[in-house]
Image: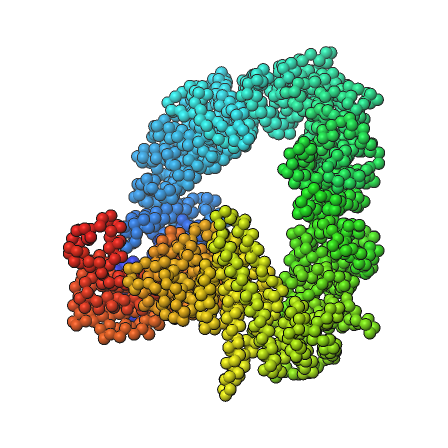
Amino acid sequence: MGRQKGDGARSKSRPSSSSLAASLLPSGSAAVGFGGYVGSSRLDSPLASEEFSDIDSEMAQHLKRLARKDPTTKLKGLTSLSMLLKQKSGKDIVLIVPQWAFEYKRLLMDYNREVRRATHDTMTNLVLAAGRDLALHLKSLMGPWWFSQFDPVPEVAQCAKRSLQAAFPAPEKRLDALILCTSEIFMYLDENLKLTPQSMSDKATALDELEEMHQQVISSSLLALATLIDILVGSQLDRPGFESITAEPKHASKARATAISFAEKLFSSHRYFLDFLKSQSPAIRSATYSMLRSCIKNIPHAFKEENMKTLAPTILGAFQEKDPSCHLSMWDAMLLFCKRFPECWRAVNVQKILLNRLWHFLRNGCFGSQQISYPSLVLFLDALPPKEIEGEKFFLDFFQNLWIGRNASNADQVAFFQAFKECFLWGLHNVSRYCNGADAINHFRVALVDNVLIKLLWHDYMSFSSSKNEDVVLWRNSKDPSESSTQLVHKRAMDKQNIKYPKSDAQNLGKCIFEILSGIYFLDRDQLSAFCATFQENCLEIVKQTENIEKTENVEQIIKFLALMGQYAVLKDETWPLIHLVGPMLSKSFPLIRSLASPDAVRLLSAAVSVFGPRKIIQELIRNKGYSFGHLSYDGGEKLGKEDFLHIFKEIFTPWCLHGNDSSINAQLDLLLALFEDEYFAEQWCIVITHATKVESCGFKPGSLESNQIAVLAVLMEKAREKLKERKLGVDFNHHQDCQPDHWHHELLDFAAVSVACSLPPYGTSDSQFIRAVLGGSTEDDQASFLSRDAMILIFKDVLKKLRTFIMASSFIWVKDAGSLLAVEAVDSITELESSINMLEAAQFALEVLDGSFFCLKTFCEGSDLVPCISAALFIIGWECNMANELVNSSNDQSMEITKARMNFGEALLSLRGKISNAFWQSLSIPSQKRLGSILILTIRSAIFKEDKVNANEIISLCSLWMAEVLECLCQDQYQEQNFLDLFLANSDVWPLWIMPDSGCAKRTASFKIKEVSIKTNTTGSHKFVAIIEKLISALGIDRVITVCGSNTLSPTEEASKELATSCFYSRAWLAAEILCTWKWEGGSALGSFLPLLCSYAKSENYSPKEGLLDSIVNILLHGALVYGASGELRFFNVWPISSDEKEIIEEPFLRALVSFLIILFTENIWGRDQAVILFGLLANKLFIGESVNAECLRILPLILSVLIRPLCSTVSDESHRDAFPTSHEENQICDTIKDWIQRTLLFPPLTAWEAGQDMEKWLQLVLSCYPLTVVGGSKALNLERDIDPVERSLLLDLFRKQKHAAKSAAASQLPVVQILLSKLIAVSVGYCWTEFSEEDWEFVLFHLRRWIESVVVMMEEVAENVNDVIINRSSSDDKEVILKKLEHAALLLDSLRINVARNALYAFSLFSGLTELQNAEDADNSNPLRRERWDLVKDRIVEAILRLFFSTGVAEAIASSSYTEASSVIASTRLDHPHFWDLIASSIVDSSLHARDRAVRSVELWGLSKGPISSLYAILFSSKPVPSLQYAAYFILATEPVSNSAIINKGTTYLVGNTTDTCDIDSSSEEGIQLREDISCMIEKLPYEILEVDLVAQQRVYVFLAWSLLLSHLLSSPSSSPTRERLIQHIQESANSTILDCIFQHIPLELSSAYSSKKKDIEIPAELLEAANAAARAISTGSLLFDVESLWPVGSVKMASLAGAIFGLMLRVLPAYVRQWFSDLRDRSASSLIESFTKSWCSPPLIADELSQIKKASFADENFSVSVSKSANEVVATYTKDETGMDLVIRLPQSYPLRSVDVDCTRSLGISEVKQRKWLLSMISFVRNQNGALAEAIRIWKNNFDKEFEGVEECPICYSVIHTVNHSLPRLACKTCKHKFHSACLYKWFSTSHKSTCPLCQSPF
């Protein structure tokens, strides 16, 4: 991704320019850098060149590059040198070592880390190549080499270490090298420590870089020095990095002496390194501490009494260091200093230098170094001399400040509390250091425990009780160090700050307290008494003051503390917490706990029992006499006996815990369960249940339990279930015997649960809670029940009874039908229940029970219908709720209130069902799944066919969702799915409507029978059913609904295996045929939705022809079509194959479905010629039954054959093969069959002798269907679909001429059927027999064509006149409705039959036009032009009639739209009924001649209606009900002559026919304004900003783009020098809304345009961007938008993007200044950058090329002016000379021209003053930047401006130009006083900006 760092724009093999220049120097020249430097030394002597005299020239060259300043060159040099080192020999490499050593030292201090890293890599390669030869130069290298090991950048330091290890792999060798070069290393490091930032580099380096480089050098040198001293002076085990060396190296003693000597000198000369501690760099300070530590360790004798006064305050006062990176070395130095020099304390003021800084250090949380500093505190305490501090005060201050520091930082709390504990226990253990005597020691310890442990730690631990959720608020104090510790501790309660800590802090604090207590216990247990007393006091306060919220919260902390005891004490078998803390506390508080019944107090007791166990707690209560237990006593010896324990549990705890108040019952029940012992569980549970129920099992009756008993039982069982979960998960480690649900079973519990469940309303608030608790099953993983199976069955039967009662009360019939399916054995009759209870309340109770226990149903689903019936009830009630939603809002009567109540219940039930996953339903047993699926599917079918209250769309939507839900929930494989689908699609009286499948056939398609129904049958239910099936197919796929492929591996049942053995494939072809016959349904249709799905499936890999699905569908439909063939009429009027809209005409469902299906099969190439031949043969055989004709087959055959004929025949495009005979046997048979049909048709009389009752029409339709023609007429239609032989053509010609020779005056010829058939026959004959036509034949054809077309013209003109009369003659009393009705009545004159006949005529005329074009091309040299002229005259008259027809419909719409918008829709809608007719009209108009269009426009102008031809064209173009072909035709006429000149500008005179120049009647004065036609001004000038919010393919956007396309085309076609064009451009610049450009770029995805322009080949260009870019370039090159407008329809996002790009491109060419102004106003930089990138990549290159080409071709025709063009530089040089003056102006076009303005510069002037030169330069800039058009024109105008000046024309004093830069006018408005002339535009601007009307020069009134 991108170039490597440092590569620049060159390849790796190409040197940089600087290195290339250096290589050109003579061989003996030195490596001279920039400024004459070699490396860092100035080249002062020529002797420097001797350094490289013996070095390899290539390596010398790269060494020279290392002296450069820029890091890129250095990196390249190092890389190249490294590569060379690998290739050269050791002898060559040794020669460069001296020079390398010099460069090496300098490179190690380079600012760029990459340079330093590369240096070490090069060093590694050098030492590997040089080997032992490096030893001669080791001393010069070792100093910087050792220094580099401590580079502050870890990666660089690691590279340095690798280089050293490469030279000396063994540690012994590295140590020997250090010993050998000891003196050199010390001297090098000493030199480094003396460096200053100014001495490190030249002045060119930035100061901040110098400072950073200096800091790196000093810190690395100090670390290197400290480490070297440790290695050479320290003991063998203390050598860092050389610990593995066992033997003493040779010369080690000498090196040690040398090191000590140097260390002492450095220590003295650098003032003990203390100056470095003042550095601002933390790295230097940290290194200095390391250096001091090394000196303290290795040269302690250097620390003398005279320097101790300086060193001790500095080292011991180091707590003022705030940077945590320095603290590790600081602590090392300080602790070692204290240990080595105990007398150092006498040299400092301990309080001032040490303690005050220490307190500040601790209060600030060690400034962030907690991990380092906290563990060091106990070592520091051990190092402190006792005599220098006051023991008790010091420790109190120490712990107080340490605690404050914890509050002030987000320290690691574990490290903090560990350090706190260690320091506290260290203080207790070492009290004797500070006190003498037992009393003093005891007093000291008591003070620490009281002030620190109790008043600090324990007090803060209890303060955590105010925490909420995860955060707690602590207080902390802000204390002056001078305050006493005692005052401080007592002041803390008054001084609080809100500081938040994580919840885990409380646990860490509690652990710390406990560990301290444990340590105290083992040190001196008497010291626990104070804490024990405080603990007991706090607990008693909690028990007594339960109403206090703060005290209530404190109990949480006590409970957590008890839990900590259990975690850390009980597991270690420590008994002291129970004996000394918990036992005495409970003994004192137990009487209060029982009497007050405080929840918190009880929870405290429960916690203690959970931690220490029930028997131990009771033992402690007895031992401490905490409560009267009768005769029981305990002396602490043996465990409490079983009988005594159970006696206390039964007599004391069970009654008390089961009879608490509402506030404490939860806590008491927790306590009761906590008192359970594993070995006595059964006895204790029996005691509890017996006491809770208080009755014998035989006394249970429904409703016999009291509500308070049920409430207690509910809570008890919920808590028991929670305990069960905890013990299963292993959370409760103290109990494990009661983790099985069976252990909780009890007969009394069963009786109680059944009694509550079967009781009658009203229900108590806890009834359902109790049932849920004992049943379990609230989640899938909680299926444990406390009841027996029999009790559960009884309960769920009652639940089902309640739900069924609710269902049967529904107002929906289908819901009641579903209720009848839910009858279960042993379920009581609901009659009594309905009359005695509130049904909704009972259902609500059942729902509540199910909500908490549904999943336990799975435990007994085998052999019971309860599970499927209850499950079905959930689905049914939920579905009823879905449907009820549609009724509640539409009714307000009382019954709807009940419906709303049911709906609320249903919504609650839907919420329950949402919790149940599909895995649960699929885990049910197979019989249960089948039963459930059967109930639900029958319910859905009932809803489809019986529900009539709800809208059909809603029923379809709901039922399809329900069915999909059933399949998703219950089906695990395809066999289950198919079984359920079979059940859903099963036969009934109302389904299917057309086809009845044979249910006994395993393949489901083997046999079928047509159902005897009438075509007019009411099909509402069937249509809904088909709509649902179609939705299922969309969701599941055809391969799962229509056809299924079996697989043995997936078969779950034996039954499915048997079915699979019958056939691997089975399909429901009958279902597909049924859907096709249904044709239309709510929300879909066969054409729009089903056939595309079927087509996609047939093309997919999932389809196999072996299925026979398509063949089966065709056979079913064909059989049905033959059965229904005699019903209804079939009459088709066109000569091309039937289209999608004409399929609707077919009323018979089977035939319509068959034709549609065959069209899809052949047009999508799913079927080919072989299938067509087979089907043709089948139909031909069915046409005759013996010798008689099958009337039904004859009737349907033309339609089917019109589809088959194309795939049967091959297209012949070559005229020479037109008479070729068929070659194959099938083709011969087909041709013979068709010939036979024609001969049979010839036996009938001509059409003019029409006789009713004959089959003449059917046979003629059959014959005509054998000759297909394309939908598009013209010359394209001459490429016929069939190739016929001469015999067949002769027969067809005879059939045509038979009609021609018949009497034209016969009355039968006017019959509609005759007109239709004759028009079709003429069209077919023209297409297939025109080569045999005589002149009489053509006369016959053209006579009828013109007659038919003109009849429609007359009809359409009459409609237009009627519309005009309605609008003009409307009265004031006529409202909109009246006008619309009148217009609808006027439109009724349109006769569809005449239009259909005219459509065929238009098609035949298009064929004739194509033929005449071919004939004229072939007969260009024919000597007899009369023939061509004759046909041309007739053709022009027909075209004129077509144009009149076109203008008539447009005028009618234009007139209607002048009243109401809806009125235009009335007229426009009439065109939608005949789309092919208008397509043929549009095609003829586009091909019409200029003369024909001219005459048509004249006729409309002379017509005298209220709207003219231009308005009619705009009405069609911007129609509310558009026809795309007509829109393009209207655009074509508007954009071409003779209409284009009047299409844009609103003018006062009438249209001048035939004038091709600018015909607008506007005064040539440039000051006169201009006005656009109202038809487009609303989209050009008044474009609303809301256009940006509409859809990208909305009609409004399309019309705006078309309006701008017309405007731009008009501008481009206008002469560039036309005054009208200039004024129009000025008007656009001032008035046109630039929102159009924002709108354009909404269609172009600019985000990827920049990626493409940056040549990222992996970016896939979106189609929209590519189309827009190509269209823009094409529009710029061709100057036309016709191509993009013609291809716009049907409108889509890609086509809109193409048109948008074309408009933008043409705007850049025609209106560059307009676009540039919009671009400069953009405020979004990102958007403007993307737009500029798009323009620069796609638009600017052709524009610049075009501009330069125009300038080059332009003829300025003046010897004083010349222009030269440089295409490579995109420059134009304009030279103007006059007499002795001259001027050269250079115009440079930017890469993103014209978005960016051109640059104009004056490169030469002669004899022109600077003022005038500047004025002329500015005028040129103004001309080229304001020019909307070609730059050549701007240069021409500028040249004319110069000419005018030299001619003496006075310039405008405002703009200093003769010719105005925008409208190109001359100064004409003169001041009456000073006589100066001004441009009118300049003067207007002056008046408007200055707000006065005075002359700009003389200030007199103008």
Q: Residue at the spot x=72%, y=19% of the render? A: 654
Reply above or below: 1209 against 720: below
Residue 1523 visible? The answer is yes
Asked whether 846 or 446 is in front, the reply is 846
* Position in image of residue 395 (x %, y %): 45, 24
Q: In this view, does 1335 lie to the left or right of 1596?
A: right
Residue 1821 visible? The answer is no
Q: Residue at the spot x=65%, y=26% of the render? A: 611
* Position in image of residue 1324 (x %, y %): 64, 75
Quarter location, residue 1562? bottom left
Reply above or below: 531 against 1284: above
Quarter location, residue 373? top left
Reply above or below: 1375 against 878: below
Q: Is residue 615 left or right of residue 1839?
A: right
Q: Residue at the spot x=17%, y=70% of the render? A: 1781
Asked whether 856 or 1895 is in front, the reply is 1895
Q: How many marks?
A: 0
Q: Residue at the spot x=43%, y=58% of the render? A: 1576
* Position in image of residue 1085 (x %, y %): 67, 56
Asked whether 1020 or 780 is in front, the reply is 1020
* Position in image of residue 1692 (x %, y %): 53, 59
Q: Is residue 1739 left or right of residue 1696?
A: left
> Residue pushed farthest bottom?
1423
Quarter location, residue 1086? bottom right
Reply above or below: 1023 against 603: below
Q: Which colour scheme is used?
A: rainbow
